[in-house]
């Protein structure tokens, strides 16, 4: 019965250097013996780097390939960061198990607030608050639409106002 069949445990020699409160949720083998490991804190890549769930813009699963769009900090501003897409990372998963579902669920759950706002003359910005595992409170970021003049003073001022308004609206009552 497949219902009761358990996936093999992650081999000790493939286990990444987990933090004290970090635990493995799922994993999948890659060609050459490497693994992708999903934990409560993020996704461990074969190169030994962990992407926190809040550092992943998007995860797409084709049924064979998991494609991750990591976030990269372009600018740090007062109370938030401006993020851009880093290069895509793709992984062929022949026996994915629960890994794609865990990745999608964890990335989605990290988003606590999101809203999109048009910006003149022909751009826009998405304001996002994310939960970061092991950190109290929310981490704020923005992603600009492709044609937005991100460094123009009116755009920066409007973004500052939008983020401050979102932070105020989501702040716990005193």
Image: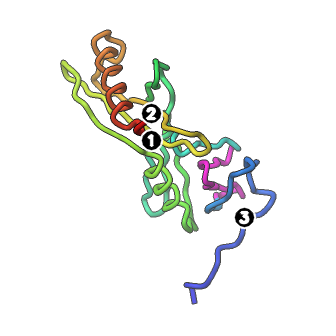
Give the residue displayed 45% in from the left and 52% down from the top: 109
Callout 1 secondary element: strand
Mark earlier in primary sequence (3, 2) = 3
Mark earlier in primary sequence (1, 2) = 1
Task: Say which of 64 and 104 sits in front.
Answer: 104
Q: Which residue is mark 2?
A: 85
**Relative vertical location of residue 158 with respect to residue 38 in this rendering, above or below:** above
Pointer 3 local density, CA inside 10 Å: few below 14, some 14–19, many at least 20: some
**Relative vertical location of residue 92 with respect to residue 83 in this rendering, above or below:** below
The question of residue 89 being in magenta is answered with no
Quadrant of the image occupied by residue 27:
bottom right
Quadrant in which the C terminus is drawn: top left
Point out the frontmost of discs 1 and 2.
1
Callout 2 secondary element: strand
Q: Which residue is mark 3?
A: 10
Quadrant in which the N terminus is drawn: bottom right
Give the residue displayed 76% in from the left and 56% down from the top: 14
Q: CA distance from mark 3 to mark 2?
A: 30 Å
Q: Which residue is mark 1?
A: 57
What is the span of residues highlighted in magenta in the rendered image?
A: 30-47
């Amino acid at each position: 019965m497949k219902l009761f069949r358990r996936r093999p445990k992650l081999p000790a020699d493939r286990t990444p250097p987990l933090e004290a409160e970090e635990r493995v949720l799922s994993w999948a083998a890659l060609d050459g013996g490497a693994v992708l490991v999903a934990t409560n804190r993020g996704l461990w890549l074969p190169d030994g780097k962990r992407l926190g769930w809040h550092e992943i813009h998007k995860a797409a699963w084709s049924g064979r390939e998991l494609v991750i769009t990591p976030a990269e900090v372009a600018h740090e501003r007062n109370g938030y960061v401006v993020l851009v897409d880093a290069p895509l990372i793709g992984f062929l998963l022949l026996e994915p198990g629960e890994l794609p579902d865990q990745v999608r669920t964890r990335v989605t759950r990290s988003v606590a607030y999101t809203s999109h706002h048009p910006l003149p003359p022909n751009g826009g910005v998405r304001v996002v608050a994310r939960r970061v595992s092991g950190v109290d409170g929310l981490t704020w970021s923005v992603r600009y639409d492709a044609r937005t003049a991100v460094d123009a003073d009116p755009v920066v001022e409007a973004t500052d106002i939008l983020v401050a308004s979102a932070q105020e609206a989501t702040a716990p009552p005193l």
